Amino acid sequence: MAHKKENPSQPKSKLHPRSLHRKRYDLQLLAESHPPLAEFIYENEYSDLTIDFSHPRAVRALNEALLRHYYHIHNYCLPAKFLCPPIPGRADYIHYVADWLVQHKKYDIENPTAKKIKCLDIGTGANCIYPILGTKIYDWSFVGSDVDAKAIEAATQVLISNKSLADKIEVRLQKDSKSFFKGIIRQGEKYNVSICNPPFHSSAEEAQKANLRKIKNLKQKKIKQTILNFSGTSKELWYEGGEKKFILDMIKESKAYAHACDYFTTLVSKESNLRAIHQTLRDQKVKISKQIEMGQGNKRSRIIVWGF
């Protein structure tokens, strides 16, 4: 039986209803916006246009094309060693946070200038992707923090290279790797919401093994050395105690900053961590909390929101 060629207009129904990425990638259109992508596009055995998602330069070119085509970011150069995030999933996080803020009368999507949103991004990384998307989609302002000085330097270069971002986003170095809000939130500052995509792994070795598995799954053959398309520095990918310890520590510290931030949020990738997270929220006597489910392709994740 002949394979039915997929239509780029076919929706990715699990993405947020306001997502610009609900349809399959139109790679030809993206290459028109960002010509360097063209060299990575090929026709697979089913006569569909695709790219090699295990190739780091191909993934970076796709991200640059998406940012240029949909978000009008024309100067985005991410150093090779840093994490190259999938943009549709990152945009979904922003959309769901916007829904929460609308529900709690902190934001008006129809009239974005009526209530200015200020957001704190914990672990913004060199890619600075959440502030970029939040600024471009909803006109929010951001402070992004990171413990890696080189990541802050790279993010700063992105902001300098894109004037539309410079007056909306500020990045700050977190000098204490065990703190989240202390040393970043300054006296008198007030945020509507914080966001965070925690390090997933508990060690560098665990991160490396997971990276190998991802690429093997993509290429469907054995490889001996990781191609760092997912890559990322150690500080982006792992934290002693892993995602669970990172989130539990952040929840505990957040209580001291309840006066400075209306709502705190974090992405949770591992479902097995949810029980401990919800128990810690109860222990900290949060006033309100919610688990928001997200989906992209076969991957499931969720956002935890809490406030005091």
Image (tube, rainbow, N blue to C red):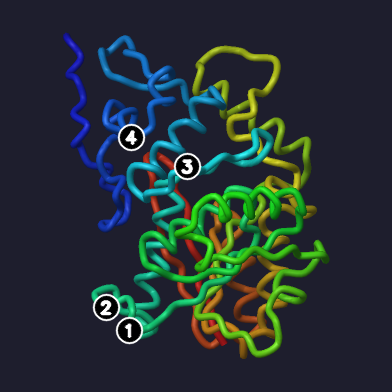
Contact (Cβ within 8 Å) of mark 1 with mark 2: yes
Q: CA distance from mark 1 to mark 3?
A: 31 Å
What residue would you read off at disc 3?
86
What residue would you read off at disc 2?
111
Q: Image quarter for residue 146? A: bottom right
Instruction: Please tell me how crowded label 1 is: few (under 14), some (14-19), or many (20+) other residues with Cα within 10 Å.
Output: few
Name the amino acid, label 3. Answer: Pro
Q: Nearer the viewer, mark 2 or mark 4?
A: 4
Q: Secondary structure at mark 3?
A: loop
Residue drawn at x 30%, y 79% as measured from the top left: 108
Residue drawn at x 57%, y 29% as measured from the top left: 214
Q: CA distance from mark 4 to mark 1?
A: 33 Å
Disc number placed over residue 114 in the picture, else none:
1
What residue would you read off at disc 4?
33
Contact (Cβ within 8 Å) of mark 3 with mark 2: no
Q: CA distance from mark 2 to mark 4?
A: 30 Å
Q: Nearer the viewer, residue 194 or 198?
A: 194
Q: Position of residue 174 (x, y in %)?
A: 76, 65
Residue 270 appears anywhere in the view: no
In the figure, is residue 299 to the left or right of 268?
left
Residue drawn at x 57%, y 50% as measured from the top left: 158
Residue 86 appears anywhere in the view: yes
Instruction: Please tell me how crowded label 4 is: few (under 14), some (14-19), or many (20+) other residues with Cα within 10 Å.
Output: some
In the figure, is residue 219 to the left or right of 19?
right
Name the amino acid, label 1. Answer: Ala
Looking at the image, tell me whether mark 2 or mark 4 is earlier in sequence order: 4
Q: Position of residue 286 (x, y in %)?
A: 58, 85
Instruction: Please tell me how crowded label 3 is: few (under 14), some (14-19), or many (20+) other residues with Cα within 10 Å.
Output: some
Name the amino acid, label 4. Answer: Ser
Q: Position of residue 70 (x, y in %)?
A: 33, 47
